[in-house]
Amino acid sequence: MTVVTMKNNNFENITDAYQLVCGARIKGKKQEEIFELGAYDADKRGYTVYPCEEGVKFTDFSVVIAEKELKNNYLIESAKMASLRDNEPVNPSMLLMNRYLKSA
């Protein structure tokens, strides 16, 4: 059994809420677990986050994490690395976010 981990150089700091798009992969600054970002829940004032292992998102378990906590304690997969993922289309929102950040 081979365990696949993503190196920290594939991830970058979350500097703007525009980076937090549905489908983006995040990981904690101090742990190796990978999560996939879900939709923003306005009632709970946070983003739904699903565990992700070897490219499989587990939708039977989720947590809600506030934007401030995401910015302080998590890293987000760079848009460039997301586009290189095998057999997965890049989320159009992620490309739009990348263009927005470059123009700012």
Image (tube, grey):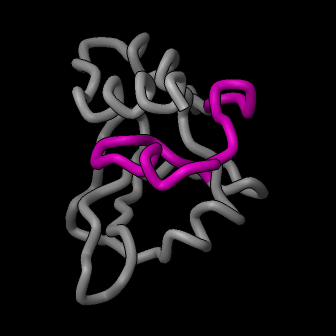
Q: Which residue occupies the foreground of this view, 58 or 50?
A: 50
Task: Give the left or right position of residue 38, taking residue 30 as reference.
Answer: left
Q: Residue at x 51, y 18 (%)?
A: 81
In the picture, measured across the screen, residue 89 lies left or right of residue 94, that is left
Let me know if residue 67 appears in the view. Answer: yes
In the image, what residue occupies the spot 22% across and 18% down? 89
Spot occupied by residue 44 in the image (x, y as percentages of width and height)? 31, 88
Looking at the picture, tell me which residue is in the foreground, 86 or 89. 89
The C terminus lies in which quarter of the figure? top right
**Residue 63 drawn at (x, y percent):** 38, 76
The quarter holding residue 30 reads bottom right
Residue 67 drawn at (x, y percent): 51, 69
**Direction right: furthest residue:** 30
Location of residue 11 in the rendering, given as x and y in whole percent from the top left corner: 64, 34
Q: Tell whether position 1 is magenta.
A: no
Height in image: 93 above or below 72? above
Q: Which residues are magenta?
A: 6-27
Residue 1 is at least partly visible in this image: no
